Image (spheres, rainbow, N blue to C red):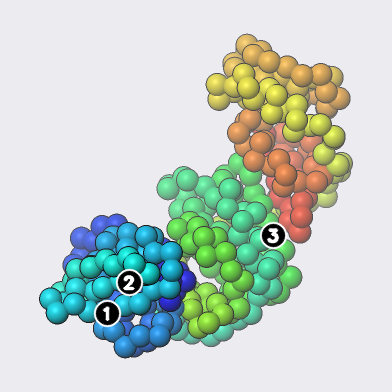
């Protein structure tokens, strides 16, 4: 039961201005359930208890448990969480618990590839709220995509899913926290919510948002002259990073320079093509991600490939 109770923790809201029980947990019908207004999680549990404990107190109680958990009710109506010698008493809500439940058709993906893709693309999700479509990961046919508006990354899922949706950042983070293979994806008919089903009949259900991605195929499907990333390239970039104050990286003939405006703060001898200029932070995001890259394409997008993925990084002008 402890595993089940920990599974739903990401569905508990920290604040609730709607009085819909979003900061609470629902236990009943042989399952434990939580919904924070964006996503919900449910896991079957072996209990006949019916309760709606306060989420923050419930989480603190669960986190203190190290042995198997049993649940019961006190005479005063509190939920008792017992684990070994430990007992906690959690108050309940009198409000109803709002529900977000899975519905729609089921689709199957390669579980390992899907989870790995989420982890690979998560660092490239944008924080630009003015381009909401870029603040999540897009599932589109056989591809998973993410962009921070300077780097585009495309993961090949191999298995085609006949829809196009954008997973919100919080949902991506929760799928990564769960860190288990997804057996089925369920999409509602209106394409406004998605559910991810796991073993033991547990699931995560999330609302989706609408957003139109630009046509990235015109960038990623171009011909390129990619070469393997030179040995020691990112080691040199990391050495220069020690002198960074948010600077840019400039490739010059026979060296890489870390520049702030016209000032050179550090440099490293390295056989690179003269001319390209990149944001230091964005370039470092490609470390341990790419195997080949086409720096010759600068100032256009420099295409790259990695482990079952490809993409492009945009240089600075």
Residue designated by label 1:
72
**Which badge, 3 or 1, is on the more N-terminal residue?**
1
Q: Which residue is drawn at 52% across and 47% down?
A: 126
Disc 2 to disc 1, how far (Cα)?
8 Å
Asked whether the beta carbons under mark 3 and mark 1 sit within 8 Å of each other, the answer is no
Asked whether the beta carbons under mark 2 and mark 1 sit within 8 Å of each other, the answer is yes
Q: Residue 267 carries which label?
A: none
Q: Is mark 1 on a helix, strand or loop?
A: strand
Q: In which quarter of the image is residue 243?
A: top right
Disc 3 to disc 1, how far (Cα)?
47 Å
Residue designated by label 2:
82
Residue designated by label 3:
155
Q: Position of residue 150 (x, y in %)?
A: 61, 41
Q: Which residue is drawn at 68% across and 56% down?
A: 154
Q: The C terminus appears in which quarter of the rendering?
A: top right
Q: Is mark 3 on a helix, strand or loop?
A: strand
Instruction: Name the front one of labels 3 and 1.
Output: 1
Q: Which of 177 and 304 is in front in this view?
A: 177
């Amino acid at each position: 039961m402890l595993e089940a109770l920990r599974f739903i923790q990401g569905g508990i809201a920290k604040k609730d201005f709607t009085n819909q029980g979003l900061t609470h947990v629902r236990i009943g019908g042989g399952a434990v359930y939580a919904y924070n207004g964006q996503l919900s999680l449910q896991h079957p549990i072996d209990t006949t208890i019916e309760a709606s404990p306060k989420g923050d107190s419930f989480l603190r109680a669960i986190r203190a448990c190290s042995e198997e958990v049993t649940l019961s009710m006190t005479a005063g109506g509190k939920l008792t969480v017992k684990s070994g010698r430990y007992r906690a008493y959690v108050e309940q809500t009198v409000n109803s618990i709002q529900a977000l439940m899975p519905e729609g058709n089921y689709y199957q993906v390669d579980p390992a590839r899907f989870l790995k893709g989420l982890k690979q693309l998560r660092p490239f999700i944008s924080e630009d709220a003015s381009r909401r479509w870029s603040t999540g990961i897009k599932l589109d046919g056989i591809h998973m995509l993410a962009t921070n508006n300077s780097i585009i990354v495309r993961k090949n899922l191999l298995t085609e899913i006949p829809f196009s949706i954008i997973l919100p950042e919080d949902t991506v983070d929760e799928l990564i926290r769960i860190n288990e293979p997804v057996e089925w994806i369920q999409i509602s008919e209106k394409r406004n919510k998605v559910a991810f089903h796991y073993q033991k009949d547990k699931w995560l259900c999330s609302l989706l948002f609408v957003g139109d991605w630009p046509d990235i195929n015109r960038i990623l499907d171009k011909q390129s002259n990619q070469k393997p990333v030179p040995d020691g390239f990112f080691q040199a970039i990391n050495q220069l990073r020690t002198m960074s104050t948010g600077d840019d990286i400039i490739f010059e003939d026979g060296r890489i320079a870390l520049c702030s405006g016209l000032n050179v703060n550090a440099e490293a001898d390295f056989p690179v093509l003269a001319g390209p200029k990149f944001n230091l932070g964005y370039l470092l995001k490609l470390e341990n991600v790419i195997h080949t890259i086409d720096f010759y394409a600068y100032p256009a997008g420099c295409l790259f490939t990695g482990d079952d993925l490809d993409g492009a990084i945009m240089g600075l002008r």
